[in-house]
Amino acid sequence: MSMRKAAIVLAATAGLTACASGGARTEGATAAGDGLIADPFEPANRAVHGFNKAADRFALRPAAQVYDAATPALVKHLAGNAVGHLAVPAQAVQGVLRGDLRSAATSVGRFAVNTVVGAGGLLDPATEVGLPAQPEDFGRTLASWGVGEGPYVELPLLGPSTARDAVGRLGGVALDPVSWAAPAAHAEWVPPAASVTGAVDWRAQNMATVDTALYGSADSYAIAKSVWLQQRRALIAGGDPTAAPSAPDIYEDEPF
């Protein structure tokens, strides 16, 4: 185990204590008023949100505009498939950890089919044969183990989160088979490159709705928190995270 990966594992383990004490009373809260979720770090969160908006305005949004204008639709489709394909092994691991062997088996089958028949993941025949992508991540796994969501936090460049999901991101990286199996020469750049590609592709696909939410609303911080949290809770509960609310998820989770 490398020192970097060992540090990730230790950080994820240490962070569970903070999550375990804070989430039970807010897990089922509605979006009404201040009862949505505990937000004791709101001043700092708003400062990070301002940084994230600036990063979007001056980096992500322009990159997405160039990408959308200069990249053929087929290439964008293949790039999206490739990024999603790299996330499948981690989804299989999380299915096992949650005790959902059906989800894990679906992910294993999906990865095998798309690797062999789908040109290494550029194509997605697995969905056509009944092996859809599984919405698994380590934050959801922690929730299934009874870890509370903890207070709300906004992460630099990553956007809305809870204490539990922040820990889940670290644990997800540590438990991702791709990061362990990748040759040393590629292990440091493949996940970040996939993350950047996925973020730019997602931003390009959601240009109008994200622009409206970030730059056309009186309080984009409140919108980001409300929409992300409701959709996140719907996903963890096993429902459709896009069913409610109808406003856009400003910072969608990336596979890495």
Image (cartoon, rainbow, N blue to C red):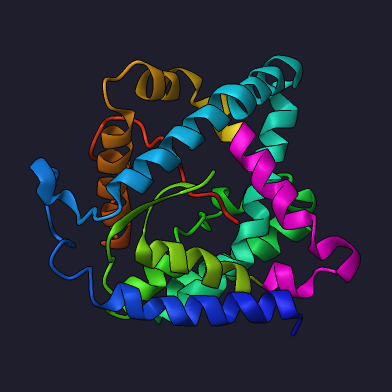
Residue 15 in the image, given as x and y percentages of width and height? 42, 75
Q: Does the magenta stretch include residue 187?
A: yes
Query: Which image quadrant: the N terminus?
Result: bottom right
**Looking at the image, residue 54 lies above or below residue 199:** above
Residue 175 seen in the current view: no
Relative depth, front residue between 14 and 230: 14
Q: Farthest residue in the bottom direction? A: 1
In the image, 40: left or right of 220? left
Front in this rendered view, residue 153 or 123 = 153
**Residue 216's quadrant in the figure?**
top left
Q: In which quarter of the image is residue 31?
A: top left
Q: What stretch is highlighted in magenta?
A: 177-200
Of the 4 image quadrants, the one containing the C terminus is: bottom right
Decide if residue 227 is in sight here: yes
Across and down, in percent, residue 142 comes to 37, 74
User: 62 above or below 31?
Assistant: above
User: Above or below — where is 256 with respect to 7?
Assistant: above
Instruction: Name the residue rendered at 33%, 37% in the picture.
Output: 224
- Residue at position x 74%, y 21% from top? 72
Q: Position of residue 158 (x, y in %)?
A: 51, 47
Residue extending farthest to the right is 185
Residue 166 higher or lower than 82, as above or below: below
Q: Residue at x 45, y 17 (%)?
A: 208
* Main secondary structure of the magenta stretch: helix
Residue 254 left/right relative to 17 = right
Residue, x 35% and y 31% (percent of image)? Answer: 248
